[in-house]
Amino acid sequence: MNEAIRLCRELAEFSEEAGKTTRTFLSAPMKDVHRLLGDRLRAAGMKVWIDAIGNLRAVRGDARRLIVASHLDTVPDAGAFDGVLGVVLGVLMAEALAGQPHKLGLEVIGFSEEEGVRFGVPFLGSRAVVGTLQPTSAMLQAIRHFGLDPAQLPEVRLAPGAIGYLEFHIEQGPVLDSLDLPLAVVDSIVGQTRMEMLFLGTANHAGTTPMLARKDALACAAEWILEVEKEGRSQSGLVATVGQIENTPNASNAIPGQVRVSLDVRDACDQVREAAVEKLIAGAYRIAPTRGLAVNVSRRATQSTVRMDPALSDVLASSGMHRMSSGAGHDAMIVAPHVPATMLFVRSPGGVSHSPKESVHEADVEAAFGVGLQFFKDLEKQLV
């Protein structure tokens, strides 16, 4: 088996849940991931450390360096390759380049959090390295519990001198598979808005409360969720999703008194995305009073569409590779305003991701590794 695939599957065993791959921000199994990858990076001659946000960091060479990075956290019951493949390919690049003189340095980063599972806010690791993280008290507590010092967060920042950022990532969609292509260069990452809606009704007895006297928070949320789906279908390219529901008191014989739901809206056009978000907020405020409820709206994160660096992308796609945009968010969108960035997508068979059925083709991974090494060499030639 391809060493990258083997290593990804080994890392998938480090999990919070037996029989599943679940590894959230600064959870205990992240220490095992750091140990395994850190040992390999040290053996490749890299200086290795864990920074104050829990990112795995490794560097070799002078300030002029290429950063290869992705994330090490997962969604619940995840596959083995989302995020992790990008870090593993960075480790294998470090090993392949070890013991040789290079004008270009290399930094490998395994970001501690990209998915936003634990605190509802994504990109904690990459936000910290570019200086835009605003940690909550809960995040600071998690950092301390992991054995790190939040007072050192300002030191997490990237050192100056990086000439580029490369992120390998599985596509997480069906485009490359439908085109029967192994790889693609990412030109842009679509913008996204993440929100939370709290529908506030009245909990009561399911058997004794007449239907017309109810203030059912779940029924209200369900009506609004159908509007979310309708809006998401209203124009090509726009997607809108409610993926998380917390129902209180969550008992079969009780009327729901409080329901908290997530909202995720994405589009390559920021104006389209924002218009959809405002329409859905207005819909929640319109629906709730008709049922005698109140609603609280919270914005968790907003990220504009980010274009990858054209010059770097041209170098990466020098062999005439397919180019496309990414509907999923990635750490590259956080780093790109600060360091020239590009991404390489690896085909996702069947378009499956965020699932234990997530997979890759061995030949695709080998091709991606070869492209990454050539990219490093091409950038190094530009330094002469």
Image (cartoon, rainbow, N blue to C red):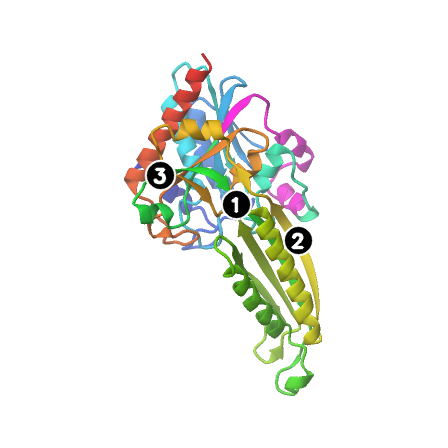
Residue 183 bears which disc, if any? 3
Residue type at numbered disc 3: Leu
Q: Magenta segment: does it hold 161?
A: yes
Residue type at numbered disc 2: Arg
Q: In the image, what residue occupies the spot 33% across and 45% down?
A: 360
Extent of the magenta region: 139-165
Which of 227 and 252 lies nearest the eye of the viewer?
Answer: 227
> Is residue 183 something that shows in the picture?
yes
> Is residue 53 something that shows in the picture?
no
Residue position for label 2? 299
Q: Is residue 63 left or right of residue 155?
A: left
Q: Secondary structure at mark 2?
A: strand
Q: Magenta segment: does it hold 345?
A: no
In percent of width and height, residue 165 lies at: 50, 30
Name the image quarter holding the C terminus: top left
In percent of width and height, residue 114 lies at: 54, 44
Above or below, 43 relative to 217: above
In percent of width and height, residue 336 lies at: 55, 33
